[in-house]
Image (tube, grey):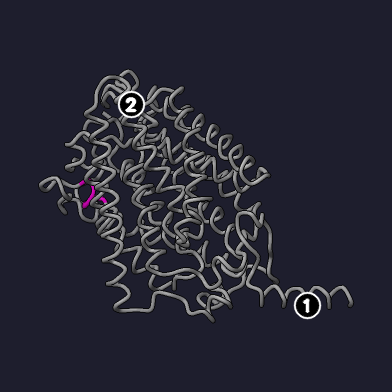
Amino acid sequence: MIDTGDTAWVLISAALVFIMTPGLAFFYGGMVRSKNVLTTIMQSFFIVAMISVEWVLIGYAMTFGTDINGFIGSLDKIGLAGVGMNVLENGTIPELAFVAFQCMFAVITPALITGAFAERMKFAAFAVFILLWAILIYNPMAHWVWGGGFLAELGALDFAGGLVIHILSGVSGLTLCILLGKRKGYGRTAMIPHNLPMTVLGATLLWFGWFGFNAGSALGANALAANAFVTSQAAAAAATVSWVLVEWRFNGKPTILGAASGCVAGLVAITPAAGFVAPLPSVIIGLVGGVVCFFAVAVLKEKLGYDDALDAFGVHGIGGTWGAVATGLWATTEINPDGANGLLYGDSHLFIAQLISIVVAYALAVAGTYVLYKVVAAFMETRASEAEELTGLDIVEHGERGYGRSVMAGSPMLGSFEDSSEMLANTVMNINTQKG
């Protein structure tokens, strides 16, 4: 029987998760150089449209259709055939409300990847790759964990997407940025965020929308949703504090970019655990998440030398990994009787299942992204040329400019200045303006 309160909450949560992808566009858009701001925003905005169509046509059927040997859903629900106004099995909401809610998850997941290859991938190749990735990587993984697949049978728990969303997108992003190669001048010239207020606005929208992301995954207006809401807030706040403190200690100054990154890291870390752990462990999860993600961004990336432009792997890949492990430690049936007890509650089965699932997610992300990239690269140009990078993809790919003149902002500790030639041109322009 349909419960109107539960239905209202799930639909509101779907709207909250929807706003996260435009929020991500602002978050990422503020962190790139001004000549690439529209390209970066366009990628997230276009994904909202493209993946929504894919989800209705085939994505929902592949993910939540009748299970085929634990690996994929059948196409019995292709084009949402037969979904109608039926009540969700074992639920209290219309299945269409669940379709809408899960659609927003399918949308934001590939959008997260774009932060890794920012400022250097051509739009046509991006669109084809993302569509194939959604169909052939996201949909199967979501089925394995949420649609009755073999990882669900194994006992893996992922309340709102640590495995399915954050590990999958973060590791895929790392793989893709390595395959594409580094941006021109990376490691030699500064590439700092051009508009930090935009980034903070994006982080705020992400934090706000994340309540629908996590609490909405309870699929009802109930105590479990309240728990997920509180654990999400606690972890985000704790990670913000820990990131800023460790950044302050190592770099000498606390930055707003660090605070914004920290809150997202905490939200990523708590996502798989939000409906399985109590509030106190969520604080610990957030504190540790902020620290490990900071070191992934500030130390690991520099040591290994890969150009994960906006730290999709450092925040989502590493944060999601820690969250999946933490779920295996602190999950308890006292919070969610449909879950399991973790290692710290006397049961090792869940912890082992989480580790296996992490390995599966990493393997699928690396192998799947590699194969898809090679297929796309065989038919079209994927990487912008050095001249196109210098000009900026806003003009080259879209024929638009975000601002009347180049804008620079941010901390040199976390990025760098615009390309030297562009800096020189802007300096001359400013001098002439002042003389005039």
Q: Where is residue 304 in the image (x, y as percent from the top left)?
A: 44, 58
Quarter of image, res 250: top right
Instruction: Write the residue at 21% across / 29% down.
Output: 349
Residue 43 lies, with reference to residue 321, above or below; the image says below
Mark 1 crowd level (few <14, some 14–19, many ≥20, 10 Å Cα): few
Q: Where is residue 428 in the image (x, y as percent from the top left)?
A: 78, 77
Q: Position of residue 277 (x, y in %)?
A: 38, 25
Secondary structure mostly taken by the magenta-highlighted segment of the chain:
helix
Q: Where is residue 360 in the image (x, y as percent from the top left)?
A: 24, 48
Residue placed farthest to the front in the image? 303
Considering the numbered disc 1 on the image, is that residue within a helix, a strand or a loop?
helix
Residue 286 lies, with reference to residue 47, above or below; the image says above
Q: Does the magenta stretch include residue 63?
A: yes
Residues marked 1 and 2 touching at CB (< 8 Å): no
Residue placed farthest to the right in the image? 435
Instruction: Write the residue at 27% across / 56% down.
Output: 137
Q: What stretch is highlighted in magenta?
A: 60-64
